[in-house]
Image (cartoon, helix red, strand yellow):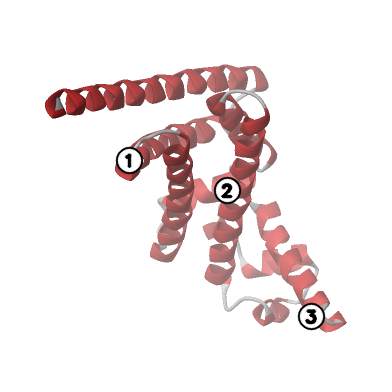
Amino acid sequence: MMPGPRAQQKEKTRQAIIQAALAHLSADHSFSSMSLREVAREAGIAPTSFYRHFDDMEALGLTLVDESGITLRKLMRKARSRIELKGSVIQTSVDTFMEFVERNPNIFRLLLRERTGISPAFRDAVAREIQHFKEELTDYLAQESNYTKEQAFTLAEGLVTLVFNAGAEALDLAPSEREALKDRTTMQLRYLTFGAKLIHSDGQKNANAKAS
């Protein structure tokens, strides 16, 4: 059943608040320095109307973190679909991630800042999103290879750390520098993946030798 006009308007206003907060994020303006009045003014609502949609600014911030993580994970799922059609796993994943950073710098800044911010609730929320990211990649690696779950998670954790660090560096780079960073990151990920395959292969050989 379709939601009624009032429910549709409420959701429209809620999204306007979310977009207003994102619009105010920048290299010089963090979420913690943002005021409720700023967000309300940008969203075109009275400050008191804010409380019909969020309990306080922290509730809004947690929603931003959740939606940012969901957006990123959806993009990476699409990247894995593109991998099935053509191209390298690593190259396609790096391209997709860097496209996300380039098109959504404020969203990525939010994830980076709140990952080590002063709010425990924000830190926990960002940690959960990154954990979801690692777990999805773990499932993919385990499915596409014969890694154990533990081996796949260890590799996924290293890959995610490298990519997030590259994304943080990419935020303030010129286009040519960003391309060089993408190439460097792709090579680093290949080194890590190749090393994991060698270690895994050696482990299997040793296990087979002991069994024979």
Residue 149 position by quadrant: top left
In the rendered image, the quadrant that contains the N terminus is bottom right
Q: Identity of the amino acid at label 1?
A: Thr
In front of the other: 95 or 78: 78
How far apart in space, not on screen, are marks 2 and 3 (Cα)?
27 Å
Q: Give residue 187's position: percent from left, percent from top.
A: 47, 18
Dot 1 corresponds to which residue?
148
> What residue is rendered at 58% in x and 48% in y?
73
Question: Which mark, residue 7?
Answer: 3
The first of marks 2 and 3 along the sequence is: 3
Category of crowding for the residue at label 2, using alpha-carbon neighbours closer than 10 angstroms: few (below 14), some (14–19), many (at least 20): some
Outermost residue to the right: 5
Q: Give residue 94's position: percent from left, percent from top.
A: 57, 29
Residue 92 position by quadrant: top right
Question: Which mark, residue 73?
Answer: 2
> What residue is rendered at 51% in x and 22% in y?
186
